[in-house]
Amino acid sequence: MPKPRRSRAVRPPARAAALPRRGGLAVPWITGWFDGRPSFGINFPIRRIQCITHRACQFCRQPLGRRIGLVVRPADAGVGYVDEPGMHPECLDYAVAVCPMLNGSMDRYRTTLPAAVAALVAVQASRAGKPAEAYEAWYITPSGYEIAYGPDGAVLGIRLDVPVLMKRPVRAAARPRLTDEQAALLRQVLDLEAVRAVESLLEIPGETPS
């Protein structure tokens, strides 16, 4: 996996000038704030719906333009919609550069969430501790922007079964970590293979049954 870029050196797009800063980073408009601090990676539910229904950028809150960027996981493509709002291409580029989940700095979703946060973001909490998934950037036009609704009329996200201008990879899926039992078995296999390799090099025949 390519080495993540140094996020602090990346400047946010000009349209994000009014956004608050935290640790040198622009805080996306959709980000939830708890106890006076932003929780990066946690989308505030009401703002998520507002962005989707009003075709606003989740990063800068401004109206989306002629090209709309979507951050898509294989699971999203499977259900036919992405639950995160769209972004301007330049806002998406900044998010990819500074977000540790998107730029590859993190290989797993955070293990735990504060109780106040978890109560609001049940979907994101369900990913806690799991390996990072593959992400792609999909670009669509306003004519292909369609909202996905649930049976009860709830806003699910933006539909993906529409014409797509371009797709590009953002990050690869993280390799799953081995359990202790799997690691022990792998060591045994590697040790056995090492012995066989040495025997082959030295032309030492193995024991044959009498």
Image: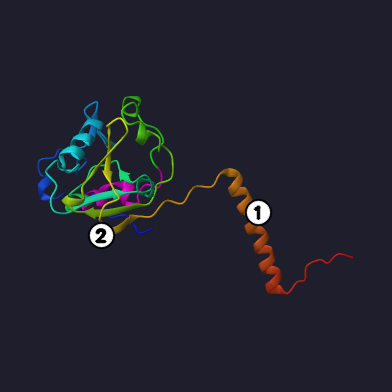
Task: Assess whether residue 34 is covered by the magenta stretch.
Answer: no
Which of the numbered marks, if any, corresponds to residue 158?
Answer: none
Q: Quick one: quadrant of the N terminus?
A: bottom left
Amino acid type, callout 2: Met
Q: Residue at x 39, y 32 (%)?
A: 112
How dense is the environment of label 1, judged by Cα within 10 Å: few (below 14), some, or many (20 and up)? Answer: few
Which of the marked residues, 2 or 1, is nearer the chain's N terminus?
2
Q: Which mark is residue 188?
A: 1
Instruction: Specify whether residue 29 is in view.
Output: no
* Residue 166 place in picture, x, y as percent: 25, 59
Provide the residue span drawn in magenta. 93-108
Residue visible at 83% across and 67% down?
Answer: 208
Q: Main secondary structure of the magenta part?
A: helix
Look at mark 2 in the image and give the residue it sits on: 166
Front residue (pair 145, 113): 145
Determine whether 151 is above or below 201 in the image.
above
Position of the C terminus, as image quadrant, is: bottom right
Q: Position of residue 60 (x, y in %)?
A: 15, 43
Q: Can I make out residue 57 in this image?
A: yes
Residue at mark 2 to residue at mark 1: CA–CA distance: 46 Å
Q: Amino acid at mark 1?
A: Gln
Label 2 packing within 10 angstroms: few (<14), some (14-19), many (20+):
few
Q: Based on the displayed image, in which of its 4 quarters is residue 116 positioned?
A: top left
Q: Is residue 174 left or right of residue 88?
A: right
Would residue 98 be counted in the magenta stretch?
yes
Which of pointers 2 and 1 indicates the residue nearer the eye? Answer: 2
Q: Residue at x 36, y 31 (%)?
A: 122
